[in-house]
Amino acid sequence: HTGRLVQQLMLLGRLAAEGRGDIDRAPADLREIARDVCGLFAEAALEQHVDLELQLPPAPVTVVAQSELLAEALANLIDNALKAAGRKGQVLVAVIESPPGLRVCDNGPGIKPSERAAIFEPYARGSRPRWEGTGLGLAIVRDVAALHGARVSVSDGELGGACFAFEFPRG
């Protein structure tokens, strides 16, 4: 836990510094990023008996971005979704074509509408946290989105829990 905390704190500091300047960007296929990150969580999902599903469109979904930061943001969303879904749960990761983006949904308890804005603040964990954590993951997701001119939002999802959308501007 300490190693992960240090990594998250360092990334949050890096994002603050990069927010004042420009980040290196290159064309990136969201399908490849989603495949790679889901692969990192496949074993954990199997151990928890969680159905981790990846939905990909047939054609590349290319954005101009910093791939490593997008991968970290997606990893934070998937990690939270696996924890929220719990044992024998469901997590859906989808790449969306228009507007280009990513969605991560779970069948966990969801997030109260009154708490949705606050969960993106550093160290926020909601009124009744259900697992251990630092409250940095969603702040990192928010900052990565902002650096890319994207937006992140949370709503009720089709699996009954929370659904996070990371959307890039059109074009």
Image (spheres, rainbow, N blue to C red):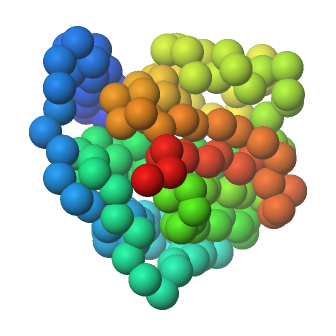
Q: Residue at x 17, y 32 (%)?
A: 23
Residue 29 lies, with reference to residue 135, above or below; the image says: below
Residue 24 lies, with reference to residue 67, above or below; the image says: above
On screen, residue 90 versus residue 76, left or right, reads right
Q: Residue at x 34, y 64 (%)?
A: 62
User: Which picture quadrant has residue 53?
Assistant: bottom right
Q: Is residue 46 something that shows in the picture?
A: yes
Farthest residue to the bottom: give it: 58
Quadrant the N terminus occupies: top left
Query: In the image, residue 123 lies at what x, y percent?
Result: 52, 14
On screen, residue 82 versus residue 31, left or right, reads right
Query: In the image, residue 64 lies at what x, y percent?
Result: 28, 51
Query: In the image, residue 50 lies at what x, y percent?
Result: 63, 69
User: Which picture quadrant has residue 91?
Assistant: bottom right
Q: Is residue 13 something that shows in the picture?
A: no
Query: In the image, residue 61 lies at what x, y percent?
Result: 41, 69
Is 155 in front, or is 40?
A: 155
Is 105 in front, or is 82?
A: 105
User: Which picture quadrant has residue 154?
Assistant: top right
Residue 55 lies, with reference to residue 8, above or below; the image says: below
Farthest residue to the front: give it: 171
Number of labelled discs?
A: 0
Farthest residue to the left: give it: 24
Q: Residue at x 43, y 53 (%)?
A: 171
